[in-house]
Image (cartoon, rainbow, N blue to C red):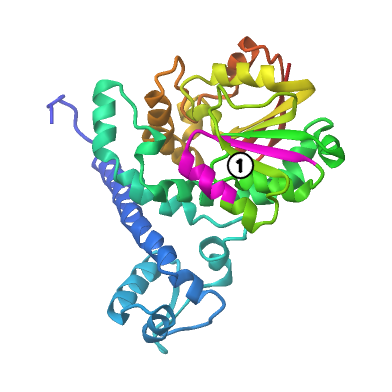
Amino acid sequence: MRDTGKELDQDRVSQFMERVASDSAAALAGLCTSLGARLGLYTAMAEAGPLTSEQLAERTGLVERYVREWLASQVAGQYVHYDAETRTYSLPDEHAAVLADATAPTYLIGAFTMLKPLYGTEDALADAYRTGAGVGWQEHEPELFEGVATFFRPGYSAMLVQEWLPALDGVAEKLERGASVADVGCGFGYSTVLMAQAFPTSRFHGFDFHAPSILAARKAAEEHGVSDRVTFDIGGAQDFSGDDYDLITYFDCLHDLGDPGAAFRRAREALAENGTCMVVEPNASADPLALVNPIGRSFASTSATLCLPVAMAQEGPQALGNHAGEEAMRRIADEAGLHRWRLAAETLTNRVYDVRR
């Protein structure tokens, strides 16, 4: 370390060291959380009451010695409760709502199952940081695509039909009567399927450039019985097919594009008269100081390792990252001919914009 002649405040050094040690512990614990979900351990514990490590191993078909060690990690993180007298472990119902119930709006497991493929790109990221290249979406392992879809699904399930669509002027009424919708960057199609379930008289078209995601989306449509009114096709945000859409949606994807302006220009062309774009973006500020909180830190870290490298890989004129802020996105839309921009809804993690010509 360079000698600056300054005497360090050792209390501050210790405090920061404790924080970094805590972060290191959380990073290692994240692997244990992902394993717990992957191996069905949380699901097996949910509503089961107190279990010994032997009982949990039997329920899951796993080796007891490993299960006991995993449980120790969960007790250390206060995810699981331990009764020393009975030597039993229990997962509180409130914790199960976050770790075991995939239908709950509080389910956060997707944030952990994304870790394996993200950590696996560290070498590619280091190279990209040196050269200015990117790390494309398709370069990641399949667990990332599933993890991202799993992460966003609970929030969409809780808010999309109930809050966000009604917040757009006149859009819910159009969907009730029967409208044409393009869901651009649809991924696994969860958002598309949710809308199709809620509005059976409308027709929905999901587009994504990633072929494996389109296959997963088609499967989701079949499983939820909406294939009669939903189609999924490979298509980019700049060149998706169709015209005269009453609604074009972008769910947490515009900031991942190398050329969001081209996406907005295509939307302007494809909108029907009085059509609407619904733009859902992270609720993150362009001001770094506004990100000094757990949610902001999560967004900024994801942007540095996933969102920005994906956009850079597309070699477009604008790689925004997920915390470019409303003003930047609004300016790009205006330059593309979408002049009317309104904040329609807001949550802790998302901002929803009503955008029109």
Q: Closer to the camera, 263 or 283? A: 263
Residue 338 coordinates in the image, percent (x, y): 68, 16
Name the quadrant of the C terminus: top right
Q: Is residue 205 left or right of residue 324?
A: right
Residue farthest toward the bottom in the current orientation of the protein: 86
Residue 30 coordinates in the image, percent (x, y): 37, 56
Q: Is residue 339 left or right of residue 139?
A: right
The residue under the point 41% across, 64% down is: 38
Examine the rendering and report whether any part of residue 293 can be seen: no
Residue 259 coordinates in the image, percent (x, y): 50, 19
**Number of labelled discs?**
1
Residue 199 coordinates in the image, percent (x, y): 79, 46
The residue under the point 70% across, 14% down is: 339
The amino acid beneath tag 1 is: Leu
Q: Is residue 214 magenta?
A: yes
Q: Closer to the camera, 262 or 70? A: 262
Disc 1: which residue:
348
User: Residue 282 lies in what quarter of the image?
Assistant: top right
Q: Residues within 10 Å of mark 1 (few under 14, many from 20)?
A: few
What range of the chain is rendered magenta? 202-218
Q: Closer to the camera, 158 or 190? A: 190
User: Residue 102 lies in what quarter of the image?
Assistant: bottom right
